[in-house]
Amino acid sequence: MSEGARALTAWTPDRRAFLLRKLHSLTGVVPVGAFLVEHLWTNATALGGQAQFDEAVLGIQRIPMLPLVETLFIFAPLTFHAVYGVWLSRQAKPNVAHYTYSRNWAYLLQRITGVLTFLFILVHLWDYRIQKWLYGMTTESFYPELARHLSDVRYGIPWYGILYLVGVASAVFHFANGLVGFCASWGITTTRRAQSRATVLFGVFGFVLFLLGANTVLYFATGTRLYIPMGDTPAPSCAPDPSTRSSSTSPTRSPVR
Amino acid sequence: MAKRVVRLKVLRQDGPHAPETKRWEEFDVPWEPQMNVISSLMSVQKNPVTADGKTVAPVVWESSCLEEVCGACTMIVNGKVRQSCTALIDQIAPNGEVITLEPMTKFPLVRDLIVDRSTMFESLKRVKAWVNLDGSHELGPGPRQSQENQEEAYPLSRCMTCGCCLEACPQVNATSKFIGPAAISQVRLFNLHPSGKMHAAERLETLMGEGGVADCGKAQNCVEVCPKEIPLVDSIAQVSRQTTKHMLFGWLLK
């Protein structure tokens, strides 16, 4: 560095904004984005019935020092990414009305889905995490609770299922489009052409990830499966009726681990 | 046949500190072959009478080269930022549509269609967008520039600091300190130059400060509106790579 540059440590007010931006970008991919993939993947085990789902949940419960792992690798980075992201989004002045380019729409959608995902995660955390802390909701009750919640129909509208579909779509769009931005801001894709290739790649990835998540939501909401992951699983434990639910946990589950 | 007219709708304001005078005024000017927005504004200047017959102060605007290389006449034509000299009437209003003219919104207003773009010049000074050549003794010939380097640099050197990229950028506004695409692209240009490279770290340090390159929102409007077709998105991504490296190996691992 030339003599003109001042001697600074990395964490000075001048550098804070840049480092926070980079940390925001990084936490969105690792661990928050990685957790999203893992979470949707684990939830998809529900398609094999309650026993498989409970087993997957139990597998997570067996991780040593789980509260510490969750706090360090999920809650802390997620909270930072969400709060700093909302704070940053106030700087945006979208102008899609006059500049109708697709990337400009993606810019606007990135901010909208960011806020939507934040709100959705708050609802989702209340449903399955805060109630677990406060009222001792058991992990075995996740599956019946999900089925009861997501199949809830009011005034002919399965509003909770729709909320979850929108939540999953928001999170997945935000992640996939965020990966395009990540590659640009970390200097991985250094030309516009490379960035459009990344957009196609992560677009396909996001679509597949959405199908994975939507499949699980639809299964809990309606009992139908777009794609059945295990060939020899029994008929779906039809969600809306609680009396059939307990009896339908896959007794003929595949022994394959 | 009635005489063909061009209808201009102009957003006016009498001065920087007179927001209460902000108003739309419409003018009908006689159509002429090959006319552009500048020549239609000249017609308004000759006869400053609004469409409803009121005589008003003539509309003021800036222009110079009239061939899209100086950037002075940049304004918002029909909602989009561009140079008004190359906005040909027959192309933008082929069937006599109303043409709206507004000053750019990301710069301090001077009057009517004139804005003060000096922040762009200040940004260029901030990032040291030059090659240091002065010395008290003979420095000798500079290093040779490769053909490849020249080909990458030339398109970047076409920037005329017109302000289109800043105007179209959703991240550049009153609530943000984002320096904007133009200055970032100049950092790429001067960091490419064999002599300019000697001050690359200083330029990166500036762009790693508040409102630097990390504030880019990847909306890519800049490259869409750039009249000189400068690969601004490539420039931002290139400088992002340089700053990422500088963060890792200049700040964190040094």
Image (tube, rainbow, N blue to C red):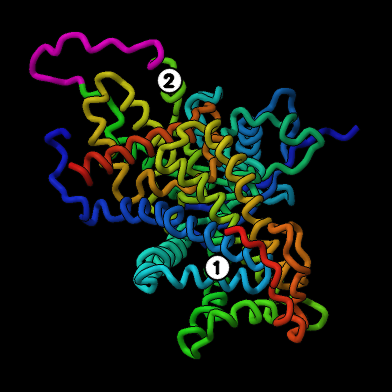
The magenta stretch is B133-149
The chain that hosts pointer 2 is B
Viewer-nearest residue: A170 or A145: A145
Residue A251 seen in this snapshot: yes
Viewer-nearest residue: B9 or B107: B107
Tell me where residue B220 appears, x and y as whole percent: 54, 41
Which residue has dot 2 on it? B152
Disc 2 marks a residue whose amino acid type is Glu
Tell me where residue B209 appears, x and y as whole percent: 29, 48
Viewer-nearest residue: B4 or B78: B78
Secondary structure of residue under mark 2: helix
Disc sitting over residue A172 in the figure: none
Q: Main secondary structure of the magenta part?
A: loop
Indicate left or right for B141 with B89 as reference. left
Task: Using the rendered view, name the quadrant where residue B227 is placed.
Answer: top right
Residue at 53% in and 53% down:
B13
Residue A112 seen in this snapshot: no
| Residues behind callouts 2 and 1 on a single chain | no
Answer few, some or many: residues within 10 Å of disc 1's Cα (few below 14, many 20 plus, some between 14 and 19).
some
Secondary structure of residue under mark 1: helix
Tell me where residue A75 appears, x and y as whole percent: 41, 69
Disc 1 marks a residue whose amino acid type is Ala
Residue at 26% in and 25% down:
B197
Residue at 48% in and 48% down:
B217
Q: Assess whether residue B201 is covered by the magenta stretch.
A: no
Indicate left or right for A187 with A156 as reference. left
Quadrant occupied by the C terminus of chain B: top left
Indicate left or right for A26 with B170 as reference. left
Task: Using the rendered view, name the quadrant where residue B130 is placed.
Answer: top left
Indicate left or right for B61 with A10 as reference. right
Which residue has dot 1 on it? A56
